[in-house]
Amino acid sequence: MNILSDLWIGAIAGTLTVLALSLVIRLILAPTLAGVSCLSANARKIVIPALLVLPAVLGISLAIIMAVSDHHLPFDLMAHHCHSDAVGCAAHGRVSDYLPLTAIGAGLLTIFLSWTMFGMAEKLHAIVETNLRLQRTVSKEQDTAFILDVETPLAFCAGLFTPKIYVSKGLTERLSAEELEMVRLHEASHIWGRDLLVRFIVSLLSFGQFGRVRSSLMAALVRAQEEVCDQKVARQYGRVETAEMLIKVQRLRRSCSGLSPQISAAVDHGDISARTLALISPEQTRSKTTKTFIAVAAPGLAFALVLASEPLHHLIETLFLSLKG
C-alpha cells in the first residue's frame, strides 16, 4: 500500500462524485427550483448556495477522506483490501510504478488550479477596478452613502470585505427623502448580510456545476437576497410603500444607458415583478421546518461521506486490479 495509489483513488472518486452530483442537479433542475421557490427568502439564501457548492464540496471532501484515511473505520462494512484472493489483498504497486501517471495528474491539476486562480484574480481585479472608478466619480458622502456625480439613476453597494453604498445624484434628485432612506436601508441590508461576499465565494466554489444550472441558481440566489432586503425595508416602511419604491426606481433605471459591464452587474437587482409580488402577497414561511431539515441533513451528509469512502475505495481498487490483470 502506498500514498500515491490512495491519492489517485481519492482523486478519481472525488471527480466522479462532482460529475455525478452535477448531473443529478442538472436533471432535476426544474423541480428543484420549483421546490426551493416554496421556501422563505431567508431559507433560500441558505439552500441555494448549498446546492451550488454541493458537488465541489462533497467531491473534494470525499477525495480528502479517501486519500488520508488509514482505512480502519469503526464500522467494517467489508474486509478491506480483500478482492477474492490473497494476492489482491496487498496488490498496491510500488511508488515508482505510479510516478509517470502522477506527473500527468499533477500537470492537469496545476492547469486546473491555474485556471481557477486566474478566474478569481480576474474577478478581484474587476471589483477593484469598479471601486476605483466609483471613487473617481464620488462627489460627496451623505448619510452613510457615497453620492456619485452622474445623472443616471443608480443605487447599489460595491466591495467584498468593506462594501460601501453608492447612490447617484440623478437618483437623489428624483426620489423623496423617505424613498431615499428606503433605498439606503435596502443596500445597507446587503452589507449586513454579506451578500456580495457570499456571491463571490459561491461563484468560485460552483465550478462543478453545468453552465445553465449555475446561471439559474445564481439568479435565484440574487432574487432571494433581494427579497430578504426588501422585507427588512418593508418591516419599517410598509409592504405597499416598499413595492411602490421598487417600481419607481425600476422605471427610472430603464433610462440607464452606456453602463460598463461591472456597473451593470452591480446594479442587477433581480426580477422586480417577482419581488413586488412577494411583498404584496407575502409567502408562508417555513423557517422552522427548513432549519430542522438543514440541521439533520448536514451531519447526515458528513456521515454518508465517511460511510461511502470504504466501499468506493474498494470498488475503484478492484477496477484497477482487474485492469492490471
Image (cartoon, grey):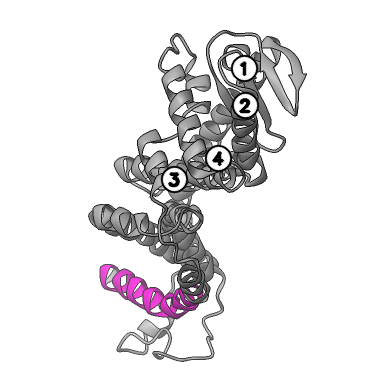
Q: Which residue position is annotated with label 4?
A: 200
What residue appears at the point 38 percent right and 79 percent down from the top-left corner? 311
Which circle's residue, 4 or 1, is located before the other in the chain?
A: 1
What residue appears at the point 27 percent right and 53 percent down from the top-left corner? 29
Quarter of the view holding residue 201: top right
Q: Which residue position is annotated with label 1?
A: 172
Identified by mark 1, the residue type is Thr
Which circle's residue, 4 or 2, is located before the other in the chain?
A: 2
Q: Which residue position is annotated with label 3?
A: 279
Question: Which stretch appears magenta?
Answer: 300-323
Q: Report if the CB atoms under discs 4 and 1 are less than 8 Å apart.
A: no
Which circle's residue, 3 or 1, is located before the other in the chain?
A: 1
Mark 1 falls on what kind of element?
Answer: helix
Which circle's residue, 3 or 2, is located before the other in the chain?
A: 2
- Look at the magenta stretch and give its main secondary structure: helix
How far across and down, in percent of the image, does residue 216 sit?
Answer: 34, 43
How far across and down, in percent of the image, does residue 204 sit?
Answer: 51, 43
